[in-house]
Amino acid sequence: MKKYVLITGASAGLGKAFALELARQGQNLILVSLPHENLEALAQHIRLTCNVSVSYYETDLCQRTNIEALVAWLQAGRFEIFYLINNAGIGGSQAFDQADTGRIERILQLNIIGTSLLTRLVLPFLLKFPQSYILNVSSMAAFSPIPYKTVYPASKAFIYSFSLGLRAELSALGVQVSVVHPGPMPHSPENQARLSRHGRLGRMATVPLELIARTALQRVQQGQPVIIPGWTNKFGYWMTRWIPWSWRQPLMVSMLRKELTPTV
């Protein structure tokens, strides 16, 4: 029987890093991403270089009907899924009074509703195994209010809370739930441009994608519920715990304004 790891947002960034690391470990993969993101080429590359089985499915997880169609495809293919990585998510930096309402809706639909619905619908696959895993990708943004990030930090705070609650509920059923909190990641030209505006501080806070993926997967195997990769992120986490928000707020406003695209 072939067992599979299902990864969303798998075509680039952290999702791709998860896929490559798991393939090196000999895991069979189901990759999910938006259409037209060269997912077929990535799947073929992994098959040839790692000698594992790789299937892929292109869809927009912001739509409930698309999530249901994905699960129907999994059922029709009789895939045995023992590991779900909910990596797909969107964010960005923008003043809230200038934010497009459609963009706000997509963040909420994908980061909160899409993750919740897919987890529920994939759960019957996971419960077939005596031990299975869910890894949800949150963010360091989950631990503190962040100005100029619209609803992204709140959506990631949901993932944090959702994951820990689900872990407590599903552990007796053999499903281990973990949540990883990456910091800034240069996974796209837009992200790289925003991080570059922070100068040295931005570079220090950035952890390589490969290290995040490798660390997260190791910690899952060790049974760790909350995973914070990189010493700078751990330091940032403790800062949010010990420094009052009233003290951090002016610094956060000053820092995050730098991420906004300058008007010409």
Image (cartoon, helix red, strand yellow):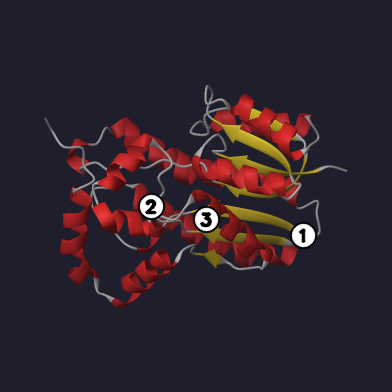
Foreground disc of the pair 2, 1? 2
Instruction: Identify which residue is drawn at 35% across, 41% down.
Output: 191
Query: Badge 2: how crowded within 10 Å, few (<14), some, or many (20+)?
Result: many
Q: Say left or right for 249 vs 121.
A: left
SS for callout 1? loop
Asked if marks 2 and 1 touch (Cβ < 8 Å), the reply is: no
Which numbered disc flags the more N-terminal residue, 2 or 1?
1
Residue 155: x and y in percent read: 40, 50
The answer to whether one can see residue 44 in this image is yes
The answer to whether one can see residue 69 in this image is no
Relative to 86, is 254 above or below?
below
| Residue found at the very far left of the displayed protein | 264
Residue 48: x and y in percent read: 74, 32
Q: Say left or right for 244 vs 69.
A: left
Q: How far, Cα to Cα, is label 2 from label 1?
A: 32 Å
| Residue found at the very far right of the displayed protein | 1
Residue 163: x and y in percent read: 54, 59
Instruction: Identify which residue is drawn at 36% across, 53% down.
Output: 154
Q: Amino acid at mark 2?
A: Pro
**Quarter of the rendering containing residue 158:** bottom left
SS for callout 2? loop
- Nearest the viewer among 114 and 11 is 11
Which numbered disc flags the more N-terminal residue, 3 or 2?
2
What label sits on residue 131 in the rendered view? 1
Asked if marks 3 and 1 touch (Cβ < 8 Å), the reply is: no
SS for callout 3? helix
Q: Which residue is labeled 3 in the image?
A: 212
Query: Badge 3: how crowded within 10 Å, few (<14), some, or many (20+)?
Result: many
Q: Which residue is labeled 2 in the image?
A: 184
